[in-house]
Image (cartoon, grey):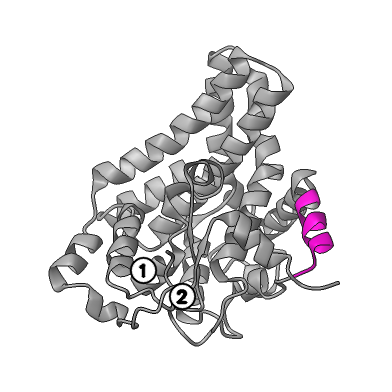
Amino acid sequence: MLPGEGAAPRVLWSEALSPAERRALLAMSPSRAWLSIGINWGLVAGAFALVAWAPNPLSVVVALFVIGGRQLGFAVLMHEAAHHTLFRNHWLNDVVGNWLCAYPVWSDLYPYRAYHLQHHAKTGTAEDPDLSLAAPFPVTRASLRRKIWRDLTGQTGWKRARATFRRDLGRSQGRVRRLDFTGVRNFRGVTITNVVLLAVLILCGHPALYLLWVAAWLTTYSLVMRIRSIAEHGMVPDQSDDLRNTRTTVVRWWERLFIAPNCVNYHLEHHLMIAVPHYNLRRMHRLLRDRAALADACVTRGYLRVLDLASSRAV
């Protein structure tokens, strides 16, 4: 039974965790952080190896979805660094968060950090910079199909590429504009990291595999980012309630592989305690669930159910 389906009395989540449990959940482990980074890059390498070993349409499709999911994984680890929960040392946290996570997927930790912390401070309000990502939902099934088609055909990715290019040159206005500095120096990180990736593939004798990285960024990465943003704050019951303005999605193994890397599906728990490292969020969820602290919380089983909710508007 999922939280919210039973009749158990609501327990305040803040009272469900002992001080010792809170300290344990907040404890950071450099080895776990490096393991997450290694797993993400290892799965990317495995997807490249799959296509090199068996180059056929099926292996290419599988590789695109694995790589797109891991590109989201790198964005999630950049998000971890934005909260200073990737490594205790702030210099190491930011260097690794940018060079091994953010730059390869054409993102940047520093402007993202300020933007994202405002999302936490203003969740669900008119000042929430992420409000537009979830506000349109639910939509009709036809509308959702069109959005997914645009994602998988690269239309969304190409639009994102143009917007990112303009942002980094300093030509964007509003919430997406860069406030630190602008100009060609902003392309240094994405250029160097992608040249290194291409060079590694050249040394392995398979330079054409780099096209999988670009194609995934334009297609499957767009799709999993859309699903993630819908799931986290779309169709929530109550924007004023901390337990009901953010969703946790209970996932299966294949969803963790393709859609929910690095425990990103435990988004409600992340909002409740933003300093909990990603690898401790599952434990936090279980503790709160087992103590009935999530009885009325927004918890959904699986992303297929989330998409069903997202496309539930009548024609």
User: Left or right of 200: which side holds 294?
Assistant: left
Which one is in front, 30 or 6?
A: 6
For the point 57% across and 20% down, the residue is 50
Residue 182 visible here = no
Circles 1 and 2, Cβ within 8 Å, touching? The answer is yes
Classify mark 1: helix, strand or loop.
loop
Identify the residue position indicated by label 1 in the image: 274
Residue type at the position of mark 2: His
Question: Mark 1 vs mark 2: which is more N-terminal?
Answer: 2
Classify mark 2: helix, strand or loop.
helix
Percent coordinates x, y for residue 191 in the rendering? 59, 39
What span is colored magenta in the figure? 139-149
Which one is in front, 314 or 216?
A: 314
**Quadrant holding the C terminus:** bottom right
Tell which residue pokes out farthest to the front in this image.
7
Identify the residue position indicated by label 2 in the image: 120
Q: Residues within 10 Å of mark 2 (few under 14, many from 20)?
A: some
User: Left or right of 280: which side holds 50?
Assistant: right
For the point 24% across and 61% down, the residue is 25
Residue 297 visible here = yes
Residue type at the position of mark 1: Ile
Q: Examine the structure image and report whether residue 65 is included in the region drawn in magenta.
A: no
Which secondary structure type mostly characterizes the magenta part of the structure? helix
Task: Indicate whether 112 appears above or below 71.
Answer: below
